[in-house]
Image (tube, rainbow, N blue to C red):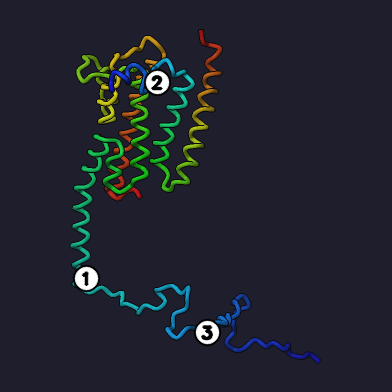
Amino acid sequence: MLAAVSAGVLMPSAAAFSHLGAMLLFALFVSMALGCLTQRTALNWIRYVLRSFTMFVVIGVLVAWLMFPISR
Amino acid sequence: MNESPVNNTPASDTAISDPPVSEPPVNDTPVSGVRIGDAPEAHTPVISTETTPDATGANTVRGARSEAKRGVLAPVAALAAWILPGAGHLILGRWGRALGFLIAVAGLAITGAVLRGNIFAPHSGDLFGTLGFLADAASGACYYVARLLETAGPDVSRAAGDCGTRFIAAAGVVNLLAVFDALEIASARRA
């Protein structure tokens, strides 16, 4: 099973992730965790995760564009 | 001639703002005396609220027992939460939070391993490596799962590998938050 995983059969390989994909995954997982910490009901949790995820992505893209002039 | 108004206010004045007395409903009360929709407590006998010395003593014993139980449960829940993300909340009966933390922490750790991030070893010889290990190991069992999955070893020469290193460290930090949350819930400082 480990060989299958390392060959990318069971799981995607590192090449399948772009920066954007990694950022989206990070935003999703962290939003889920923060939602679990702060919200009590399932509906509030879903709303919080959606709001937090959107903020992560928007701010991430904004910061990326702000850094664009100084990129190589 | 000034006539007194027809509607004289009676001596036992009711304020103008008092609502009119409502008429009883049309449907008669059934023979049993209980109407559908009545709150159960409307028909229960009134129990004296005075506490007897025995009841007070029993309450004190019960309170001491629950304090002792909380004292044991809190570190157990925190330890379980560290070892397996979500297990602490599972012990405390918070199923939703347990699942959420498990998915978040495991997802971050596994993604970091797939991206071939650096999973710091216990004995790295420098402060940066030690701090990295502490952050990674805070994810509990997910640290070892990530090490098992990363069969090809880390590759931080590429940006993806660098991201992976951050993912695994974030998994540890998020799990630490879960541990503190479980501790607070078990200590009755949070709902």
Q: Quadrant of residue B26?
A: bottom right
Secondary structure state at the residue bearing disc 1: helix
- Please give the label number shown on residue A12: 2
Residue that extends furthest to the top in the rendered view of this protein: A72
Q: Which residue is mark 3?
A: B28
Question: What's under tag 1, amino acid-wise?
Answer: Ala
The chain holding disc 3 is: B
Question: What's under tag 3, amino acid-wise?
Answer: Asp
- Please give the label number shown on residue B55: 1
Q: Residues within 10 Å of mark 3 (few under 14, many from 20)?
A: few
Question: A70 or B26, which is in the foreground?
Answer: B26
Secondary structure state at the residue bearing disc 3: loop
> Compared to A19, does B92 lie above or below?
below
* Residues at marks 3 and 1, CA–CA distance in whole angstroms: 42 Å
Question: What's under tag 2, amino acid-wise?
Answer: Pro
> Compared to B125, does B44 lie above or below?
below
Q: In percent of the image, x 24 and y 20: which residue is there?
A: B130
Q: Residues within 10 Å of mark 2 (few under 14, many from 20)?
A: some
Quarter placement of the N terminus of chain A: top left
